Image: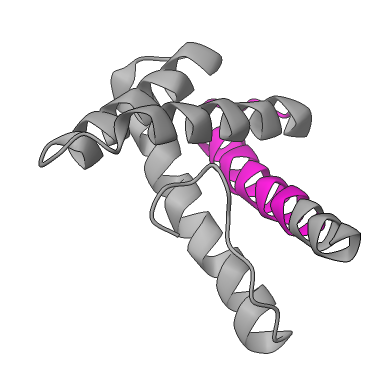
Amino acid sequence: MVTEFIGSLVAFIVALLIGGLAIYISARVIVGVDDYSHAVITALVGAIAWALTAWIPLIGPIIALIVWIAVINWRYPGDWIKAALIGLVAWVSALVILFVLNAVLGLGIGAFGVPGV
């Protein structure tokens, strides 16, 4: 039981760090913010916001996406367009990172804090 808990905790932390890395890359490219810890916190808050809204029937994923972009807009300078671009680049970055980690290294992990990956 303890081993399973530790394994789950490690998987969560790794997935959060990957989600944070994707947001870090995109925020650095789009708005020039160079702060990895800020990106990890953004991934965590964004994931919580997504979880609280995505369950709504029919329109939940759309509302959750808007709320996730709102979290990015709140955490980073710029307007809604830059926040959406940060989200888009983070999503693409997460796909590339996960492809390398999962396909090349054979790891089976995800990216916590970046929806849809």
Q: Is residue 21 magenta?
A: yes
Please identify the quarter of the rendering in which residue 28 is found. Answer: top right
x, y percent for residue 31: 53, 26
Residue located at (56% from left, 25% from top) = 45
In the picture shown, does residue 11 fall above or below 31? below
Q: Main secondary structure of the magenta part?
A: helix
| Residue 24 on the magenta segment | yes
Check the picture and name the quadrant holding the C terminus. Answer: bottom left
Please state the extent of the stretch shown in magenta in the rendering.
10-34
Residue drawn at the location 64% of the way across and 39% of the way down = 24
* Residue in front for this viewpoint, 46 or 10: 10
x, y percent for residue 81: 29, 25
- Coordinates of residue 10 in the picture (x, y in percent): 81, 56
From the viewer's perspective, is residue 77 above or below residue 48? above
Q: Give the image's coloring scheme.
A: one colour
On screen, residue 47 above or below 12: above
Q: Is residue 1 left or right of residue 15?
A: right
- Residue at 68% over, 75% down: 101
